[in-house]
Amino acid sequence: MKHVAVGVHLRREDIEPLATPIAGGDLFFSAVAVADDQPLGDRDLLLRVANIRAQLLDRATFIAVRYGYTFSREVEASQLARWKRVLESNRDHVEMTLKIAAASPRERPDRHAFASGAAYLRALHESTQAAAVDPRFREEAERLIVPLALQHRWTHRDEKSLELTALIARERVDDVRAAGEELRRACLSVPFLLSGPWPLEVFADADHE
């Protein structure tokens, strides 16, 4: 039997009995027991973990752990200390994401057209960074969504889309959804997906105190 991590939490009671708590310094990992012969990519397992993840978030905010971490290596003490600061600062906050199709998406570079992997990666980075949102849509998103956020960040996800991630107080989640509907009415021609709430991920990259 092995365990797959779901998230990092401040308190053990935020985890039990939905998942197995595994101590890490002053924090606790939520973990799901998995049979040794069950592939981590098994569909039933993925659905089970996603369901547990959602139930855990209903209880308390936590930091998402990249799927597949199985405790085969220790987390550094400095990382645990940073996670603790993030969790203490964002106990009542969640993330919501707005994924938008790029206005003029570029084609992904053809790997075979480049003599080296480094040249290909540079071209891939350039095509991703060139993706841009329709200016009017961005203006409306900044007007409707951003004022509801404690912090926000625009991110280039790939050559065809961008993402606005917002750190939201739990009590403002419905307000963000309502703002998303207003944004949809204001920009009918721009496809986007507003989703969440989610555990901390983007805003767990660095201290946001």
Image (spheres, helix red, strand yellow):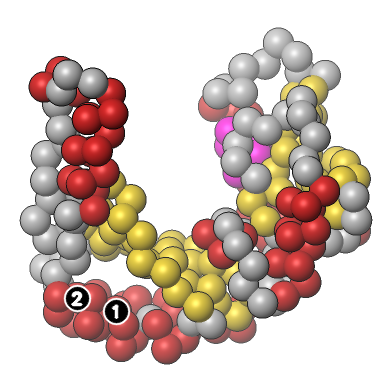
Q: Which residues are magenta?
A: 46-50
Q: Badge 1: few (under 14), some or many (20 or more) residues near its Cα, within 10 Å?
A: many
Please tell me whether residue 187 belongs to the stretch shown in magenta. no
Please tell me whether residue 49 belongs to the stretch shown in magenta. yes
For residue 14, say whether it is visible: no
Residue denoted by label 1: 141
Q: At 64% across and 67% down in the image, what residue appears?
A: 207
Quarter of the N terminus within the rendering: top right
Tell me if 133 is positioned left or right of 51 in this view: left
Tell me if 151 is positioned left or right of 169 in this view: left
Residues at marks 1 and 2 touching, judged by CB atoms closer than 8 Å: yes
Q: For residue 162, which quarter of the picture?
A: bottom left
Q: Badge 2: few (under 14), some or many (20 or more) residues near its Cα, within 10 Å?
A: some
Question: Mark 1: which secondary structure?
Answer: helix
- Nearest the viewer among 153 and 29 is 153
Q: What percent of the width, then of the height, locates residue 171?
A: 61, 83
The secondary structure that dominates the magenta segment is helix
Q: For residue 6, which quarter of the picture?
A: top right
Q: Tell me which amino acid carries mark 1.
A: Ala
Mark 1–mark 2 Cα distance, whole angstroms, equals 6 Å
Quarter of the C terminus within the rendering: bottom right
Residue denoted by label 2: 137
For residue 189, say whether it is visible: yes
Q: Tell me which amino acid carries mark 2.
A: Phe
Q: What percent of the width, then of the height, locates residue 159?
A: 21, 46
Tell me if 184 is positioned left or right of 203 in this view: left
Q: At 50% across and 63% down in the image, what residue appears?
A: 196
